[in-house]
Amino acid sequence: MRSDVMKTGVEKGPHRSLWYAAGLSKRDLDKPIIGIANSFNEIIPGHIELSKISNAVKRGVLMSGGTPVEFNTIGVCDGIAMNHLGMRYSLVSREIIADSVEIMAQAHPFDGLVLVSNCDKITPGMLMAAARLNIPTVLVTGGPMLAGYERGQAVDLNTIFERIAPAKTGKLSPEAFEETCCTACPGAGSCSGMFTANSMSCLSEALGIALPGNGTIPAVFSDRIRLAQWAGIQIMEMVQKNITARDILTHQAFLNAIALDMAFGGSTNTSLHLPAIAHEAGVDITLKDFNAISEKTPHICSMAPAGPYHLEDLDRAGGVSSILKTLHQANLIDGSTQTVTGRTLAENIRDSKPGDSDVIRPLDNPYHQTGGLAVLYGNLAPDGSVVKAAAVLPEMLKHSGPARIFNSEQEAVEAILGRKINDGDVVVIRYEGPKGGPGMPEMLTPTSVVKGMGLAAKVALITDGRFSGATSGASIGHVSPEAMEGGPIGLLQEGDIIEIDIPNRSLRVKLPEDELNRRRSQWKPPELKIKTGVIARYAKTVTSAASGAVFYD
């Protein structure tokens, strides 16, 4: 066993003594040691129930003859961290989580690893660690939140963000606004739409690193507990058969995940996280893969914020397995990939039955002929930019308008709420990328207030920062290279004409190359907004959003 190096032989007598001090017995140490990385905390709604998940995993491990040992990681709630200094720490936390899981599993060589996660940066961070470690690993997340209901209408966290503008401008009473605040998030779980947390939880099924049902079973359902117990049982089988993380996280598995992403129109943040996980697995996944797969994969699930359905609806309609079966029948995914069940992906989904044909439409009646995400290139984004195409109004798929320049999210929000943005404008928020932010803050507030001010069909927004999975509209993020690295977005001036063509995957500024070169020769990078601590260190080591915002090798 891998764990023998810390428990077997005379030389490891001191080690055993310390294990005994922790309450383990000799019999415990004779069994495989299974590390359980639990991101439980009392801050994030998606994490407040994770102790129950971890306990169920432990039962499964014990039932199958293993010894579970639990440790914890940090976790940031992106919703609570939104639109203040805290958001600069969110993406940074992904790398810290990956490092901490790697450190714990190398310092204490577990025979297998169960990742108990939920929410935006925790799941990808843990999966990055799994890819590095390459030991038997299963991911089990805490599950999605149920949607809230307000006078019979489904509401979610995004609803509140979109009502900020009406509340600030007096169109919505404080009492009505607070009612939505009290009803939109009814309890435990990751936010109920196909935002980043749920996107990654669902994609983990397509990757094969999580069990069927992981993406959609609501957090408060008893099936979630049984799924966690199954994960504990399954990790023991993987240890016995030596099925490791990289046996599962193959190049084709990532392509399968991207196809699923396109089918349900996931968060734009998946274009950061999937390449980052692939990088750790030694697999080359680029933004060009997203476009190539989008071109041939129809958008068949219209999930919030692009559509009316939430994760509980998708679960009732057959879940991720039903989507994958639909794609597999059309040869849009490869069913031969290995999964944590010990079976292939095709075997996992073989008996799945589709439910509501509107939640999961057939391929001959999609919401859109191409996938939910699009990567745009051009002289404004030579290395790419990302938009949730499925959430863009038809009249905004092509747009041309003058740039309105803001060097921070706060400046842009003030201008939008102050009615300083005109019909046809293109709001540009720059110096918010991985280096320039620093930390590439997620910006749900500006996109929400654009919609809340009634400008969704008239105004576009582009940024080198990133957006929440809850974002909708003509909101184009991850513009690369970012402004802080001298990217063209940093050369824009007020009034420059921006040309957006989502169907043709183009993002350009209407300027000749010699003018851009002239401006580039005069450009000087501004000082970092934060010069100390982890954020400053992050800015010095992080790569472009186009490469997943991983650290330089």
Image: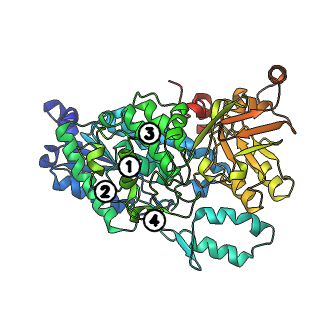
Q: Are marks 2 and 3 in contact (CB under 8 Å)?
A: no
Label 4, label 3: how far apart the Cα atoms are = 32 Å
Q: Residue at x 78, y 33 (%)?
A: 509
Q: Are marks 1 and 2 in contact (CB under 8 Å)?
A: yes
**Residue placed under numbered mark 4 in the picture:** 313
Q: Sequence-wise, which precedes: disc 1 or disc 2?
A: 1
Within 10 Å of the Cα at label 2, are there few (<14), some (14-19), or many (20+) other Cα atoms?
A: some
Q: Are marks 3 and 1 in contact (CB under 8 Å)?
A: no
Within 10 Å of the Cα at label 4, are there few (<14), some (14-19), or many (20+) other Cα atoms?
A: many
Image disc number at residue 352: 2
User: Which one is in front, 383 or 349?
Assistant: 349
Q: Give the number of the mark in front: 4 or 3.
A: 4
Residue 247 visible here: yes
Quarter holding the N terminus is top left
- Residue 352: name its quadrant: bottom left
Q: Give the number of the mark in front: 4 or 2.
A: 2
Q: Are marks 4 and 3 in contact (CB under 8 Å)?
A: no
Q: Sequence-wise, which precedes: disc 3 or disc 1?
A: 3
Label 4, label 2: how far apart the Cα atoms are = 16 Å
Side (left or right) of 493 relative to 143: right
User: Which one is in front, 236 or 36?
Assistant: 236
Q: Is residue 161 above or below residue 280?
A: below
Residue 118 placement (x, y as % from top left)? 44, 54
User: Which one is in front, 190 or 511?
Assistant: 511
**Residue placed under numbered mark 3 in the picture:** 98
Label 2, label 3: how far apart the Cα atoms are = 33 Å
**Residue placed under numbered mark 1 in the picture:** 324
Q: Residue at x 15, y 45 (%)?
A: 31
- The image's colouring method is rainbow
